[in-house]
Amino acid sequence: MSLSKLFCPTAPGVAAKRERRKEARPGELLDAALDLFVEKGFAATRAEEVAARAGVSKGTLFLYFQSKEELLKAVVRENISGRFKEWNEELENFEGTSAEMLAYCMNMWWDRVGATKASGITKLMMSEAKNFPEIAAFYQQEVIQPGQSLIRRILQRGIERGEFRDMDLDYGIYTVIAPMIFLILSKHSMGVCVRDDIDMDPKKYVATQVNTILYGMSVRPGDSGQGQSQGPEQA
């Protein structure tokens, strides 16, 4: 045994703590990156700033993520795209009506994304995607397309079960997404322009939007039945 180990042995507890610290580093780096990307923007954030906020060296950051672009992709996967499997499984097992499913989906999105720090990713993409085509293509593939597919399933289910009117599903999807985007903009941008005495409750806003959307989509007494579109001028 070396003299250093004889007189300065590493306590088991210290070694275990170091191991836990090592395992936690990727998550700490992702948290720091998310905060800085949203605060400063992707282009303006330097890798060494992310490392410093996470309490590690720049070299340590690049042990886990090869580039700043790969770091951003990991942030998106950790907070949004990596969760679509779970969300789709929840909808697969959903036993309520399609109206209830849509309401659940919109409220779930707010609780798990919109009300969290992850909501800043949408704002980040809106402001930065045009300057980073590769990142934009990645976000399109891993977030936008799966998100639209999930909503399409709900609307298609409602139509097939005779609960929703026939509709152009592409535009139906945008109708559901638009209120969510408004909430993101309000939270991260427009909210600073609103008077302090005007306070919008996101949960109430989502509930109101759900009711408005469902009123337009749902089949009601007097409708001619499934597959027959009926616009506002016909109602």
Image (spheres, rainbow, N blue to C red):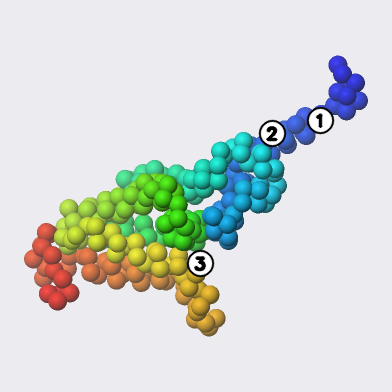
Local packing at callout 1 (Cα closer than 10 Å; few below 14, some 14-19, many 20+) is: few
Amino acid at the residue labelled 2: Glu
- State the image coordinates of residue 130 (x, y, percent, origin top left): 42, 57
Q: Earlier in the sequence, mark 2 or mark 3?
A: 2
Q: Residue furthest left?
A: 224
Type of amino acid at the residue the image marks with label 3:
His
Callout 3: 10 Å neighbours few (<14), some, many (20+)?
some
Tell me the CA gap for discs 3 and 1.
47 Å
In this view, the mark in front (2 or 1): 2
**Under tag 3, what secondary structure?**
helix
The residue that appears at 40% across and 61% down in the rendered structure is: 107
Mark nearer the N terminus (2 vs 1): 1
Residue 70 percent coordinates (x, y): 51, 42
The label number, if any, that marks residue 11 in the structure image: 1
Q: Which mark is residue 188?
A: 3
Percent across and percent down for residue 192 are: 53, 75
Q: Earlier in the sequence, mark 3 or mark 1?
A: 1
Q: Is residue 209 left or right of residue 159?
A: right
2 and 1 marks in contact (CB < 8 Å): no
Pointer 2 residue: 19
Q: Amino acid at mark 1?
A: Ala
Q: Is residue 223 left or right of residue 129?
A: left
Mark 2 or 3: in front is 3
* Circle nearer the viewer, 3 or 1: 3
